[in-house]
Image (spheres, grey):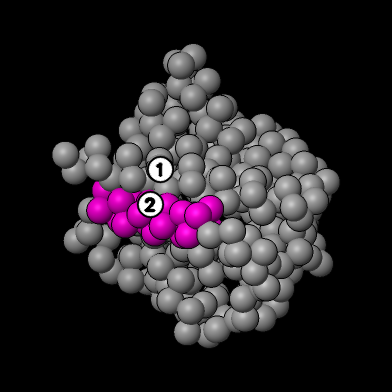
Amino acid sequence: MQQFVFSEPSALLAGCVAVVLVGLSKGGLGGALALLGVPIMALAIPPVQAAGILLPILLVMDAISLWAWRGQYHLSTLKRMLPGAAIGIGIGWLTAALVSDAVVRLIVGVVALAFSARWLLSGHARRAAPRSESIMRASLWAMLAGYTSFVAHAGGPPYQVYAMPLRLDPRLYTGTSVIFFAVVNAIKVIPYAFLGQFDAANLIAAATLLPLAVGATLAGAFVVRRMRAEIFYPVMYAMVVLVGLKLCWDGLSALL
């Protein structure tokens, strides 16, 4: 009989903290919190197992977020980005054994920091008119988002590089990102299953954390719905900086 994953108090605590942070992020508070989920859980259990436990939880969080943000989305952005994301996931699956997670995390971290630095150092960028949509830019960044989401659970920064300059209303931005990553996570189920990440022990551990996941996701949505645009976007850019720093640190630490 398999041992319960969270039989140790330290493992249960790590799992609870990770799920709360990911839930707040899935509710709309930004990708930096979600990025901390696997590393925190990996303090007590192997990283691959942590990812396997979190994916079913993410799917439930996605369902809650889709309900919380129902009717709030930018259809043309989704149409431009989702096909590229599916291609990126496919590439990630095909090359999973060839590419180091550390290299991917480092590349995405540099992209996130460069994107944020451009905004922070250029005053006019913060006052600039919304950027027009582009099928080429959308496809490129969506493909990178799908790929990095599959191989390193780090699809947020590439998505934000394209979506944030559109300057959508915060509710539309959040609702659109919720749909985008819900579809990405659903597509990832098939390759993750083939990679053997959904065994009985991991599914039982995921079910244990689900009630906490539901509450944290709803709390994140509650906070974002009450944010003004002039507060929302600086917070989002700050989240991107945190994501970039964390990814660069993880990548360099693994490579050196």
**185, above or below 236, in the image:** below
* Residue occupying image coordinates x 16% and y 39%: 256
* Residue occupying image coordinates x 53% and y 69%: 162
- Under circle 2, the secondary element is helix
Q: Which residue is mark 1?
A: 245
Q: What x and y, as percent, mark residue 254?
A: 23, 40
Q: Main secondary structure of the magenta part?
A: helix
**200, above or below 44, in the image:** below
Q: Which residue is mark 2?
A: 109
Q: Which amino acid, mark 2?
A: Gly
Q: Quick check: can you spot residue 27?
A: yes
Q: Which amino acid, mark 1?
A: Leu
Tell me how many marks there are: 2
| C-beta proximity under 8 Å, tags 1 and 2 | yes
Position of 59 with respect to 189 (left or right) is right
Q: What x and y, as percent, mark residue 189?
A: 47, 59
Point out the residue furthest to the front here: 123
* Residue occupying image coordinates x 51% and y 64%: 161
Q: Quick check: can you spot residue 2?
A: no
Position of 168 with respect to 162 (left or right) is right
* Residue occupying image coordinates x 66% and y 32%: 212
Position of 102 with respect to 69 (left or right) is left
Whichever of callouts 1 and 2 sits on the residue coming sooner in the sequence is: 2
Q: What x and y, as percent, mark residue 130?
A: 66, 73
- Under circle 1, the secondary element is helix
Position of 160 with respect to 215 (left or right) is left
Quarter of the image that includes the N terminus? top left
Magenta residues span 102-121
